[in-house]
């Protein structure tokens, strides 16, 4: 990824198939979001590198991301660029996906409408897994409510000009909780157990993003953990490991979006979804993401 250190800010050179406004639309889909803040066309995000908390202000101009540091200067600029590159999947050549979608009746209108949208990743594995577990079998609004309570109770915060910015809780912090600590936030007993269990796996080193990347079967490794089924595993492969062929085929949002695109009065069957995906081979994750986007009109 090409980037330039301009002293008081960074400039990250963007691929042609990139739309900052489309990415902001997806990131801004809930007013309950706590992990970033959007004000008009500006994105604010707090990250932590080693022990250095870095508050970023991100804009887009002339097909470049302009990244400024609000709280203090940082020497970790290369790591910041790496984080943003992964967050927006900037190294993906979308022209191949668009070419595949051009012949598909479901995807073609979506790729035209949302041209430049990229999978918005969740670079932190623990955040990706806890978010997926929280979202199991509840509506999106309540999932965001749980996430907000979880982050504000156990995450770190930074006050900048009277506004709070948050870091996601670490596995080490959550591994030391009791299920009652999460039950107070309206987690079910099962979800509390699952989240704490994942935190223990990660804090002990038994589970890591590096190991998943090196695994021949990362989905199976995830499914072996209590509370992680096929949907959660596929979601994390798609959003954290940025695997474009990950296909969370059981996803309710995916079913609703396909039903909407086909103007049907029933949801597609799993067999139908498998058949549709034959046209999306290798890009099932991107197809899913664009279909999700269609739900936020």
Image: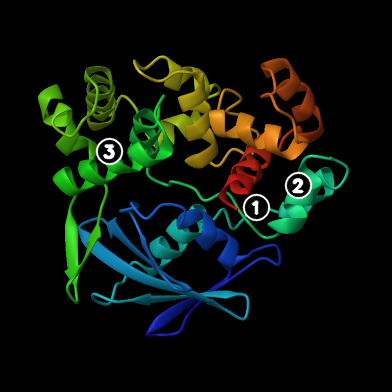
Cα separation between marks 2 and 1: 10 Å
Look at mark 2 in the image and give the residue it sits on. 97
Q: Position of residue 31 (x, y in %)?
A: 37, 55
Residue at 22% in and 26% down: 196
Answer with mark 2 or mark 3, whichever residue precedes in sequence. 2
Q: Position of residue 292 (x, y in %)?
A: 59, 42
Cα separation between marks 3 and 1: 32 Å
Task: Report the front residue among 174 and 248.
Answer: 248
Where is 95 relative to 39, above or below?
Answer: above
Left or right of 3? Residue 226 is left
Q: Answer few, some or many: residues within 10 Å of disc 2's Cα (few below 14, many 20 plus, some between 14 and 19).
A: many
- Image marks 2 and 1: residues in contact by CB distance under 8 Å: yes
The residue tagged with tag 3: helix, strand or loop?
A: helix
Left or right of 172? Residue 227 is right
Look at mark 1 in the image and give the residue it sits on. 92
- Image marks 2 and 3: residues in contact by CB distance under 8 Å: no
Answer with mark 3 or mark 1, whichever residue precedes in sequence. 1
Where is 157 relative to 196, above or below?
Answer: below
Farthest front residue? Answer: 265
Task: Report the front residue among 97 and 183.
Answer: 183
Quadrant including the N terminus: bottom right
Look at mark 3 in the image and give the residue it sits on. 146
Residue at 55% in and 42% down: 242
The residue tagged with tag 1: helix, strand or loop?
A: loop
- Image marks 3 and 1: residues in contact by CB distance under 8 Å: no
Cα separation between marks 2 and 3: 34 Å
Closer to viewer: mark 2 or mark 1: 2
Farthest right residue? Answer: 103
The residue tagged with tag 2: helix, strand or loop?
A: helix
Residue at 13% in and 31% down: 184
Closer to viewer: mark 2 or mark 3: 3
């Amino acid at each position: 990824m090409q980037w330039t250190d301009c002293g008081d800010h960074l400039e990250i050179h963007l691929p042609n198939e990139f739309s900052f406004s489309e990415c902001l639309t997806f990131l801004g889909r809930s007013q309950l979001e706590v992990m970033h803040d959007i004000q008009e066309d500006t994105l604010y995000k707090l990250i932590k590198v080693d022990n250095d908390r870095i508050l970023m202000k991100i804009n887009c101009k002339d097909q470049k991301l302009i990244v400024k540091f609000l709280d203090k200067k940082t020497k970790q600029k290369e790591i910041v660029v790496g984080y943003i590159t992964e967050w927006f999947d900037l190294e993906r050549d979308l022209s191949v996906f668009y070419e595949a979608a051009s012949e598909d009746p479901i995807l073609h209108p979506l790729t035209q409408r949302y041209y430049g949208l990229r999978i918005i990743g969740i670079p932190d594995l623990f955040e990706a897994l806890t978010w997926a577990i929280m979202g199991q079998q509840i509506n999106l609004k309540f999932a965001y409510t749980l996430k907000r309570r979880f982050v504000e109770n156990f995450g770190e915060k930074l006050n900048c000009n009277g506004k709070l910015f948050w870091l996601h809780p670490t596995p080490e912090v959550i591994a030391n909780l009791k299920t009652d600590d999460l039950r107070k936030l309206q987690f079910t007993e099962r979800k509390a157990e699952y989240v704490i269990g994942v935190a223990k796996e990660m804090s002990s080193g038994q589970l890591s993003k590096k190991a998943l990347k090196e695994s021949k079967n990362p989905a199976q490794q995830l499914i072996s953990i209590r509370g992680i089924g096929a949907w959660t595993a596929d979601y994390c492969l798609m959003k954290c490991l940025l695997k474009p062929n990950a296909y969370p085929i059981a996803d309710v949002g995916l079913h609703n979006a396909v039903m909407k695109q086909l103007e049907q009065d029933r949801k597609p069957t799993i067999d139908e979804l498998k058949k549709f995906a034959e046209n999306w081979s290798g890009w099932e994750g991107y197809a899913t993401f664009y279909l999700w986007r269609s739900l936020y009109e």
